[in-house]
Amino acid sequence: MQPNPTLDQLQVLVAVADTGSFSAAGRKLNRAQSVISYAITNLEAQLGLKLFDREGTREAALTAEGKAMVADARRMVNVLSDMRSRAEGLKQGLEAELAVAVDVAAPSPVLTRVLTAFEAQFPSVALSLSVGALGAVWEQLLTRGVDLSIGGQPVAISDELVAERIGEASMTPVAAPSHPLASYTGRVPLAVVREHFQLVISDVSQMTKGKDFGVFAYRTWRMTDMSTKYNLIRSGLGWGGLPAWMIVDDVVAGRLVILDLEPYPVRPYEIFAFHRADTQPGPAGRWLLEQFKRELPAMCATLPEAYLRSLPRA
């Protein structure tokens, strides 16, 4: 039985494939060309395959079998690199895994940019992301289900949580152009608002049980998913508040109309980062929070003029 290839042999194989020659691979790995050649010859003998076609050319051309083996070798070399990176991070106090809960109203474009940058900055840190409504993000933190939470101000201050303001966004009452409230002349009084059913975000946690936020209509439809609420409002089924980042293009294009409601003005809402008082964020967690603090103001500063002109005047 032939011995298994060593990681060193696989690294040599990848180096030759990437550089195109034994001599270039030797320079890359700071080894003599003869050492590179010897490693490849031994690897071919162990696998029982010809990996390179060396005849009639000075270049090391991969055979069909060699191309297949290089793909496997590259995966194994990358796994080793990730293992080394993770070990170095753990020695320096870097989290092995970070669990984050994010409110459904948090700006999705900002979340995407932050997580993309996070993956590039901390490739060895596994990320667990949970998206929930209202009290769900606080409850998960209190029960130690996550390490960090991103959301609005909690309904009750808890000594167990530390809140840090990281930015703000805005919630805007909207309806489809076909909805009766969209064609109302002037500011819509509360009595009229109450007669048109409202789409409302709610959650299944105990943190907000029995509590309503910004609910004025007699009839409501409740859901935990912001995308569903958005699609139902666009279809004309009801009115409701949606984050500005979600509706900018629809307002500019005329697919949604910003409502001028007496009880529900366009209003900013603060976004906070939360962690447990007995557990400080590690390097990756702190970096994530700082990235949110940079990205959130940048998003608010890029709202188009056409959208801003659509906002009701006080």
Image (tube, rainbow, N blue to C red):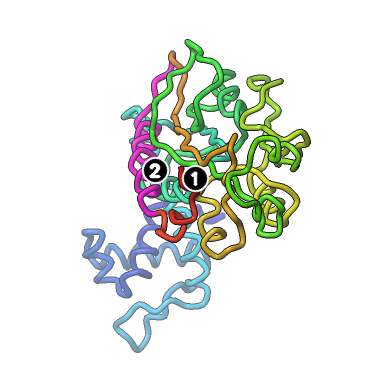
> Is 281 in the magenta?
yes
Q: Which residue is mark 1?
A: 107
Q: Which stretch is magenta?
A: 278-302
What numbered label is drawn on residue 290? none
Measuring 41% from the left and 54% from the top, which residue is drawn there? 303
Q: Which residue is mark 2?
A: 296
Instruction: Say which of 183 and 309 sits in front.
Output: 183
Tell me if 111 is positioned left or right of 181 in this view. left
Measuring 51% from the left and 62% from the top, which residue is drawn there? 252
Report if the CB atoms under discs 1 and 2 are less than 8 Å apart.
yes
At label 2, counting other C-alpha atoms closer than 10 Å, the crowd grade (few under 14, some 14-19, many 20 or more) is: many
> What amino acid type should be assigned to the residue bearing mark 2?
Leu
Instruction: Say which of 307 and 271 sits in front.
Output: 307
Measuring 72% from the left and 51% from the top, which residue is drawn there? 232
Q: CA distance from mark 1 to mark 2?
A: 8 Å
Element carrying mark 2: helix
Name above or below for residue 216 compared with residue 231. above
At label 1, counting other C-alpha atoms closer than 10 Å, the crowd grade (few under 14, some 14-19, many 20 or more) is: many
Number of numbered callouts drawn: 2
Q: Earlier in the sequence, mark 1 or mark 2?
A: 1
Measuring 35% from the left and 77% from the top, which residue is drawn there? 60
> Residue furthest toward the front?
185
Element carrying mark 1: loop
> What amino acid type should be assigned to the residue bearing mark 1?
Pro
Tell me if 295 is positioned left or right of 112 in this view. left
Tell me if 237 is positioned left or right of 260 in this view. right
Q: Position of residue 286 (x, y in %)?
A: 36, 31
Quick check: can you spot residue 29? Answer: yes
Q: Position of residue 173 (x, y in %)?
A: 59, 44
Q: Position of residue 68 (x, y in %)?
A: 52, 69
